[in-house]
Image (cartoon, rainbow, N blue to C red):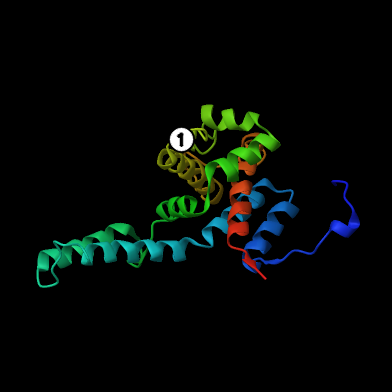
């Protein structure tokens, strides 16, 4: 602990989302790497529906307020319908749901500042991981390399999404025949290097979603 004068200490003045905090506590209190990773992922996942609804609302709004849109033209209506359908994916039961990878990307775009939320924290924790993420895919999931120092945020977020989403899927899906699946114990040495990346993202989201009391 940092040395400080007890008189300078003060209680927190923020309210944190209970659901997010519970997932975070489960992650940091577990010795199981899979539970850690998925619990941090659940922090991000918490906002998938909300952020996807915001995005689809913006898409429809942009279409209907554009100069060349007319509600009297069937082709314009169908254009709007197609844009909405393209945002979803069809499940086996024919119900429509958001594309999870797209939702993850939207969350990262909205909540994460690459420099402040990831790079700075990695530099203070294990700076060698920055080059590791740039040079190495995730061994067991084939998650993408990501150059966090790249100034093109769109490119960084796209690769960061692939790295996280592929890794999450390999932890959750373990059907016989799956090429990219996590093998307990065998792949621990690879998974442990992915934990700081998703942990710092989760921490940033929890902080940004907090409210001042």
User: Which is more toward the observer, 59 or 96?
Assistant: 59
Q: Please tell me which residue is depicted at 63% across the width and 57% down the height of the picture.
A: 207
Task: From the viewer's perspective, tell me whether residue 163 is left or right of residue 58.
Answer: right
User: Which is more toward the observer, 21 or 29?
Assistant: 21
Q: Please tell me which residue is depicted at 72% across the width and 52% down the height of the picture.
A: 28
The percent coordinates of residue 18 (x first, y second) are 65, 68
Q: Please tell me which residue is depicted at 48% across the width and 36% down the height of the picture.
A: 142
The percent coordinates of residue 80 (x first, y second) are 21, 64
User: Which is more toward the observer, 146 or 179?
Assistant: 146
Task: From the viewer's perspective, tell me whether residue 138 is left or right of residue 193.
Answer: left
Quarter of the rendering occupied by the C terminus: bottom right
Q: Work out whether 153 lies above or below 133.
A: below
Q: Please tell me which residue is depicted at 58% across the width and 58% down the height of the picture.
A: 208
Q: Work out whether 120 lies above or below 43.
A: above
Q: Work out whether 10 lies above or below 188.
A: below
Q: Work out whether 183 lies above or below 37.
A: above
Q: Looking at this view, name the residue that lies furthest to the bottom.
A: 72
The percent coordinates of residue 199 (x first, y second) are 63, 48
The percent coordinates of residue 118 (x first, y second) are 59, 42
Q: Which residue is mark 1?
A: 151
Q: Residues within 10 Å of mark 1 (few under 14, many from 20)?
A: few
User: Which is more toward the observer, 75 or 68?
Assistant: 68
Number of dots carrying numbers: 1
């Amino acid at each position: 602990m940092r040395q400080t004068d007890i008189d300078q200490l003060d209680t927190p003045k923020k309210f944190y989302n209970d659901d997010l905090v519970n997932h975070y506590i489960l992650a940091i209190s577990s010795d199981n790497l899979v539970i850690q990773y998925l619990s941090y992922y659940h922090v991000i996942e918490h906002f998938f529906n909300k952020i996807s609804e915001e995005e689809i609302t913006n898409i429809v709004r942009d279409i209907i307020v554009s100069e060349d849109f007319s509600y009297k033209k069937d082709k314009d209506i169908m254009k709007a319908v197609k844009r909405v359908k393209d945002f979803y994916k069809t499940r086996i039961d024919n119900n429509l749901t958001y594309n999870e990878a797209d939702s993850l990307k939207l969350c990262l775009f909205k909540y994460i500042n690459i420099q402040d939320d990831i790079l700075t924290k990695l530099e203070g924790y294990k700076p060698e991981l920055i080059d590791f993420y740039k040079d190495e895919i995730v061994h067991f999931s084939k998650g993408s390399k990501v150059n966090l120092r790249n100034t093109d945020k769109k490119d960084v977020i796209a690769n960061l999404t692939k790295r996280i989403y592929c890794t999450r899927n390999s932890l959750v899906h373990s059907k016989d025949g799956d090429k990219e699946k996590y093998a307990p114990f065998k792949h621990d040495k690879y998974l442990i290097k992915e934990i700081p990346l998703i942990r710092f993202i989760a921490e940033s989201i929890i902080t940004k979603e907090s409210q001042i009391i």
